[in-house]
Image (cartoon, rainbow, N blue to C red):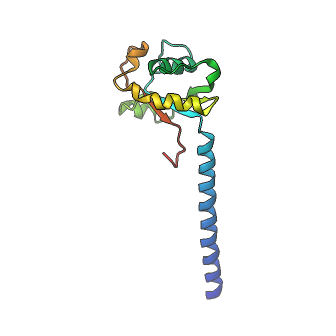
């Protein structure tokens, strides 16, 4: 019995190591797939600008980065969770917009220009609300 228990314990340790390795590889792969993605936070849900692509181009203009339709692969708001009402109570703000660019260098240009958002708000984009605008890299849950 003792020998069988030791063998099972060794197998357990080995399987835990394998699982940990697979989780790390999976996380690295998922993060790599997000290399062309940015999250834009602070943009109100009720917008005067059309779709999310237009909002992203307006944010680009605000930081002197010209973006065209061909630069944006896809963009949308992240889904509202049931906790959105709770987030609103704690003044966390509207759900972010996620954008995937067609090329990584376009994403990098916009991300590097994020410092120019200092002192700028959604009011500068024509919104009634005066929220700060943040640009963040899209990170996996583990990396966040």
Q: Residue at left 64%, top 68%?
A: 15
**Can you tell which quarter of the image residue 52 is in?**
top right
Between 129 and 64, the one lying in front of the other is 64
Left or right: where 21 falls relative to 118: right
**Can you tell which quarter of the image residue 32 is in?**
top right
Q: Position of residue 41 (x, y in %)?
A: 45, 29
Q: Residue at left 62%, top 77%?
A: 10
Q: How many marks?
A: 0
Left or right: where 69 falls relative to 118: right
Left or right: where 110 falls relative to 124: right
Q: Residue at left 40%, top 25%?
A: 116
Q: Position of residue 11 (x, y in %)?
A: 65, 74
Q: Residue at left 43%, top 31%?
A: 85
Q: Is residue 30 visible?
A: yes
Between 83 and 75, the one lying in front of the other is 75
Q: On screen, 143 above or below 16?
A: above
Q: Position of residue 65 (x, y in %)?
A: 50, 21
Between 9 and 51, the one lying in front of the other is 51
**Can you tell which quarter of the image residue 44 is in?**
top left
Q: Is residue 79 visible?
A: no
Between 54 and 127, the one lying in front of the other is 54
Q: Position of residue 69 (x, y in %)?
A: 62, 18
């Amino acid at each position: 019995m003792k020998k069988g228990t030791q063998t099972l314990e060794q197998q357990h340790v080995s399987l835990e190591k394998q699982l940990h390795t697979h989780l790390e590889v999976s996380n690295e792969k998922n993060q790599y797939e997000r290399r062309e993605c940015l999250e834009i936070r602070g943009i109100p849900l009720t917008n005067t600008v059309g779709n999310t692509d237009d909002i992203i181009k307006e944010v680009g203009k605000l930081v002197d980065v010209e973006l065209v339709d061909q630069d944006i692969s896809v963009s949308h708001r992240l889904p509202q969770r049931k906790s959105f009402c709770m987030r609103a109570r704690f003044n966390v703000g509207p759900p972010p917009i996620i954008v995937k660019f067609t090329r990584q260098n376009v994403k990098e240009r916009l991300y590097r220009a994020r410092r120019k958002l200092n002192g700028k708000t959604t009011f500068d984009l024509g919104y009634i609300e005066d929220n700060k605008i943040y640009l963040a890299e899209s990170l996996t849950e583990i990396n966040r």
